[in-house]
Image: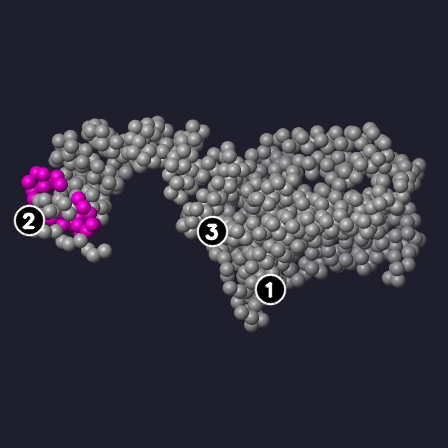
Amino acid sequence: MNQCENHSGPAGPSPQLPVQAPLLTPGRAGIPLVLILLAGLAIRLAYLYELQEHPDFQIPMYFQVDMGFIDNSAMDHAQNARAMLHLPPIEPRFERNIVWRHNPGNPQLRPPLYTVFLSVLYFILGDSQFGVRLAQMLLGLGSALLGYFLGVKLYNRGAGLLMAGFMAFYWPFIIYEANLHEPVLVIFCSLLFLNAALWWQRRPGRGRAFGMGLACGFYTIASAAVILFLPVLLCWTLWVLRSAEIHHRPVYETDTGAALPQRRGWKRLFIQAAFVLVAFFMPILPVTLLNYQESGRFVLNSFGQGITLYIGNQPESRGYLHGADDLLDEYLGDGYKDLRVDEKVARIDDWWRWAALARQAVREQILEHPGWFLKLCLKRAALFWTPREISQNITEYADRLFSRTLYRIPGNFAVVFALFMVGLFDFLISSLTRLFSRGRTPETREEYLNRAGYVLILLLILVWYAPFPFLWISAHFRAPILPAVAAFAVLACCKILYYFKTRRWGPAIMGAAVAIQIAVALYLMPVSYDDDIQTWLYFRTQHYAKHKAPEKALAIAERVIERAPDHLFARRIHAQALLDAGKKEEALAAYEQLLPDLKDKVLAADAAEVIGLLQREFGNNSAAREAFLQTLQHGPNRPVALHGLGNIAFENGNHQEAVRYLEQALQLEPTNSNTWFLLGMARSAAGDTARAEEAYREGMRVDPKDVWPVIGLANLLAAAGRKDEACTLYEHALSLDPKNAQARQGHEEHCAKPPPPNPPN
């Protein structure tokens, strides 16, 4: 806690300490904290209620392969645990879209903590997506509370409230809490670890050192990259203890709680570091043993990093996620090329061999193209910090954009990053000033603790960030480090406020101006979310198409059009959804508005063709003809448009023109019996009865169940006096469609034998 919290001014001349408002006592700080948590809970419950309106979407969609893998694996673990305890199995309440799951006999592919956490929820709650998400949202509020405690330890109670507000209201956190993915638990573990580290830092002791190492160990089995932080943590631990000894600070504590200000030497320092090290591996050891028991291989935590390295550095990599289909096809063979990605990976029989193949492939790619690899790493290093708020696995930007609850919740990474940079600059300048003025301006214990705490957070950010320039960028990899980034952003807010209160106008105005300039620059940086909106909408409309629910597809398309009115794919889906729902006049208007904006010739031809068909249905032959001609301008090989033009020409009496269009259509689609029927009519009307008969017979051949070529041929033969053949065809037509009025009428006119009676209704 800051020593100046109960004073009206700073304890010393250092700018590192803030002015704490004397009214913000622990009791008074608790009131806004409770209000923040209650407001955060209300938002989460509203969003959860909204999700319950679309329960099918709570299960991972087809593109969310990693989420599906976690979900399936957790459900399998829960079912196995219930079977071991002779409990009833969990009754599935949702159809799983993804088939991929943990393959028994392999080590853990992903860090297992979240999968275990989810399996425990399934074990207790059953297949309750509502219960799982509610538990995760409560965990998110726990992260907000831990954020408050972290801010208090780092700076003061005001900083704690800012941290709690950020964790409670920053909308990506709420999105992740509602998804079956790891970030919600990784974020909680990161805050738990940072609190444990600063708790130890204030009064180092063996028990607290053990707790700090234990928290970091759990953090590691939630996110494998954290193991890189272990040596850094040990060095930070020794630095904190050694610095305290050199300055004779009373920070040591015995088991009885007595302070020991005297210097203790390196032996005691290494003993506490050893406690951290031993505690760190205690949560990891069961995972390592489980991996060995299951696979016979030594895998400390998980082994998917080589595959991740290949995914980010295969020949087609551009900095973002790109699927590993080529290598999957090489591993599985050509027989599985048409499967979905999750279906392919589910057929990998030996993930260890697959990982070795991926490592070998990426090693060859990097060694053969070192310049390409270096440029790609530099690109990803910059992409990690862009104001892109989405994940290619979860599309959380679209989830928020189309949510009634989260749409108006403020939150932009450009602002967070701008304040982070200001806080980081201020911290570095203050630290350098302290370094060069050591001896002239004594550093208080509170200043020292604050500085050491921020050093730890900065090191965590750097170590977390270090692997990603070599992999690929996705926002759910950035999300777990957001609390650490926010700690510096909160520092910037507190310091700017402190400078204003102490009338230090220069640094106050400069800090605010720099933050505004960075935020505006990032905000204006062009970032497109078109792909994410398209992915989000495509799979949801496909889901409703699969379940034959066009009204639901239309409702979701209308919501997307409302929030993204200029998105071309959304407008196409909306027009198609109107058509599927039977709202043909509205669909026609939507397609006519869409057509001029379509630059892709294939898409423009599709839209013009639909317009032509709808205009035909409404009896507007002239408008339909213009639409079909426009279709052919964009794509000349369009049999439907050619058929439509032939039909219009026939109805207008232009029989030779009709024959020309219909023959062109049949060159592209020779199996369309209806086009053969219409061609027979056009040739017959043009006087070419011999070729008309050929057309009818070909229509009968390509589709023996189509009654119209049969009727056309029967009418042609009857008009030519070949009544025996015609009657046989009329009877055949009636056998195909007993209620067909034209077949019955032709039989009555040309055949002496009465036709078979109509079947009873």
* Side of 303 relative to 486 (left or right): left
The tag earlier along the polypeptide, 2 or 3, is 3
Q: Which residue is mark 3?
A: 344
- Disc nearest the viewer among 3 and 1: 1
Q: Secondary structure at mark 3?
A: helix
- Distance from disc 3 to disc 1, alpha carbons, whole Å, reads 32 Å
**Badge 3: residue crowd in 10 Å (few <14, some 14–19, many ≥20):** some
The tag earlier along the polypeptide, 3 or 1, is 1
Q: Are marks 1 and 2 in contact (CB under 8 Å)?
A: no
Q: Nearer the viewer, residue 678 or 279?
A: 678
Q: Is residue 474 visible?
A: no
Q: Is residue 615 visible?
A: yes
- Identify residue type, mark 2: Ala
Question: What residue span does the magenta drawing correspond to?
Answer: 715-742
Residue for point 65% across, 40% down: 410
Q: Horizontal and vertical percent for residue 248?
A: 92, 49
- Indicate whether 483 appears above or below 283: above
What kind of secondary structure does the magenta stretch mostly adopt?
A: helix
Residue for point 9% across, 41% down: 718
Q: Which residue is mark 1?
A: 124
Q: Secondary structure at mark 1?
A: helix
Q: Which residue is mark 2?
A: 752
Q: In what quadrant of the picture does the C terminus appear?
A: bottom left
- Disc nearest the viewer among 1 and 2: 2
Q: Horizontal and vertical percent for residue 194?
A: 75, 50
